[in-house]
Amino acid sequence: MADVMNRIKSRYVRLLAAEPPFFTDSNYTIEQFAADLGTNRSYASRFVNGELGISFYVLLGKLRLAYFMKQKSNREKSNINSLAKKCGFRNAFSFRRTFKREYGMTPSEYLKKK
């Protein structure tokens, strides 16, 4: 089992480095993630929950937010909602909800403080 998880972890690291980032697809599923890792849904889920300590959808949110922050710092004048969509969020509501859960404030509040 440990050998399987090590292979999945190695593939995950390579997947994170891929361009374009897998998580920018707003319709990305755990099944696609499993296929990208070369495993099945059960092992992919076990990897995320066990190795990373979060659910798959929380992982996607965290990756998308980190990517948003990186993109936003490179594009000061860009529209928040259109940039959020490019980062994989389906809509402004899901972006704001995820952002607030992660940072404890709305994107606008956060950017004003910066």
Image: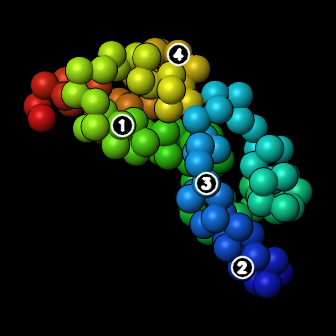
Task: Farthest residue to the right: give it.
Answer: 40
| Amino acid bearing label 4 | Asn
Locate the N terminus by quadrant. Answer: bottom right
Quadrant of the rendered structure where residue 12 is? bottom right
Judge left or right: residue 42 versus residue 28. right
Circle on res. 71: 1
Any part of residue 106 in sight: no
| SS type, badge 2 | helix
**Is label 1 in contact with label 2 (beta carbons under 8 Å)?**
no
Mark 4, Cα crowd under 10 Å, few <14 / some 14-19 / many 20+, is: few
| Amino acid bearing label 2 | Asn
| Residue where numbered disc 3 is placed | 18
Write the residue at 65% across / 58% down: 15
Alpha-carbon distance for marks 3 and 2?
Answer: 19 Å
Q: Nearer the viewer, residue 55 or 31?
A: 31
- Camera-nearest label, 1 or 2: 1
| Amino acid bearing label 1 | Gln
Alpha-carbon distance for marks 1 and 4?
Answer: 17 Å
- Camera-nearest label, 3 or 2: 3
Any part of residue 111 in sight: yes
Give coordinates of residue 56: x percent, y percent: 65, 47
Mark with earlier residue (4, 2): 2
Give coordinates of residue 16: x percent, y percent: 58, 57
Q: Is residue 101 above or below residue 59?
A: above
| Residue where numbered disc 2 is placed | 6
Circle on res. 91: 4
Mark with earlier residue (3, 2): 2
Write the residue at 63% across / 65% down: 14
Alpha-carbon distance for marks 3 and 4?
Answer: 24 Å
| Amino acid bearing label 3 | Ala
- Camera-nearest label, 1 or 4: 1
| SS type, badge 4 | loop
